[in-house]
Image: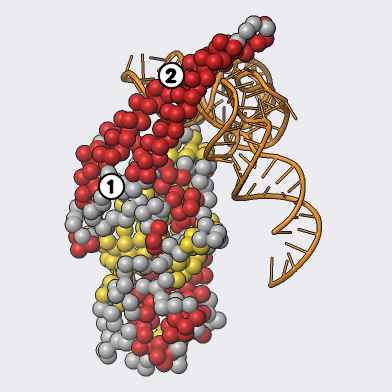
Amino acid sequence: MLDLKFVRENSEKVKAVCTAKGDQADIDGILDADVKRRAILTEVELLKKQRNENSAEVARRKKTGEDASEIIEATQSISAKAKELDHALTEIENIQQELLAKVPNIPHDTVPHGTSAADNVVHSSWGEPKTFSFKPLDHLELNDTLKLFDFPRGAKIAGSGFPVLTGAGARLNRALIQFFLDTHISNGFYEIQPPYFVNAASAYGTGQLPKSQDQMYYSNEDELYAIPTAEVPVTNLHRDELFGESDLPIKYCAYSACFRREAGSYGKDTKGFLRVHQFDKVEMVKFVRAEDSYAELELLREDAERILQALNLPYRVLSLCDADLSFSAAKCYDLEVWAPAEEKWLEVSSVSNFEAFQSRRMNIRYRPNGGDKPQFVHTLNGSGLATARILVAILENYQTDRGTVIVPEVLRQYMGGLEEITA
RNA sequence: GGAGAGUUGCCGGAGUGGUAACGGAGCGGAUUGCUAAUCCGUCACGGUGAAUAACCGUGCAUAGGUUCGAGUCCUAUACUCUCCGCCA
């Protein structure tokens, strides 16, 4: 969420950002509500002041035994009027908050301009896209003989897009999770195992609500949302908390299953693991001082990149343009791995700086050294990484002409020393 | 699922209708010189304002209600703890 004062003072810029993102946020509605809100507020505060003074006078008279009935009677109408205006105020505040909660974040100055994902800028790349002396099989074809996962049975017991991992596939997936976590821990991240369901306040805090409600699984009975990423519970760990400056930065890593309805994306990336309703991901989350957040973003990107380097998977880094930036992000890098059979880049990680957009919603602040006023922390997160697409990338990149798959070296210790997955 | 207790500022903690004690931490200041002590000050959010001045309003889990006035009384909800039941 943006600062109301910022919107008030920079309304043209905010409108321009909304246009660039193709967002329909009602900025004029916010400004309009703001004028009304402040007018009512001034009026109601005056009434309350009068009421408080009268009440004090009643208290004084009762103490001395004087008659107070006249003041009491006069104050009744003041109170009634104040209550009426309070209701009007709440109403306009709610309208304003609702509108404000739908305004996307402002992109950082270093974010490239564009009109679609096609305008994302390649920031850097690592490794050479792998070539084969034979025609590489895609992950589904490899699976025909290797039996690493079972989509038909997943569809039978749950539904389309719910994979079942089997045998070496399950073990490889688990090895990836272990490897990711261990790597992050040795890089100074603190491990968290969060709940997989969150309440509405948490989903609102990270920005899934209100705009992306239809992308989350929801239990009506319990009013709980299945998490689309560990970012949601982990960032909300510190909702409504106040840090000391010396507590920062805080670096967490967390494994969780992730659940996404993917409403509206039917027909896109429907093949196998490319887009599924449930997958595993290790997420990194940081809470930092405002002045450090862009340096921390680069460090976070490097932390994510290191994983791909260790797996020896060629990748490129995109800096997302303003049109492609997600709702809450001020700047975002996507890491994409080359999939030689698909012959395309697969997004395996998103590393974002949200600045104070989330912390303002969640009320996460720190008190600067010197005892100054509390300030909002900046929050960042990055996937490090999601296993589904990494699984695809490993199978395609590490396949042999025998139809087997070599286990990347760093994963072998997590797979009982297994070097090659065979039929 | 049943019964009971509780939720107050950064932390601890008092307060049963008259406008949030007290203690501690952190920070700022003063003072004394020896790894510290002592004293003073210091909650947050919002409104009016050029203002980091001043004034005002709001905030005691959340949302309502009663009242001239609510931390305190009433209703609902959430969460925490204890006991019982059931169960991994």
Give x and y (percent) for residue A275: 36, 73
Q: Quadrant of the N terminus of chain A?
A: top left
Find numbered disc 1 in the image and state the secondary structure of the residue it sits on.
loop
Q: Residue at x 26, y 58 (%)?
A: A324
Q: Distance between the Cα atoms at labels 1 and 2?
A: 33 Å
Give x and y (percent) for residue B60: 60, 34
Give the crowd class for mark 1: few <14, some 14-19, many >=20 residues within 10 Å. some
Residue indicated by mark 1: A25
- Which one is in front, A27 or A50? A50
Q: Residue at x 23, y 53 (%)?
A: A22
Task: State how the image is colored.
Answer: secondary structure
Give the crowd class for mark 2: few <14, some 14-19, many >=20 residues within 10 Å. few
- Which one is in front, A143 or A48? A48
Whether residue A341 appears in this view of the structure is yes
- Which one is in front, A212 or A167? A212
- Which one is in front, A101 or A297? A101
Residue indicated by mark 2: A46
Q: Amino acid at mark 1?
A: Ala
Mark with earlier residue (1, 2): 1
Residue A49 in the image: above or below residue A324: above
Q: Chain of mark 1?
A: A
Give x and y (percent) for residue A378: 41, 45
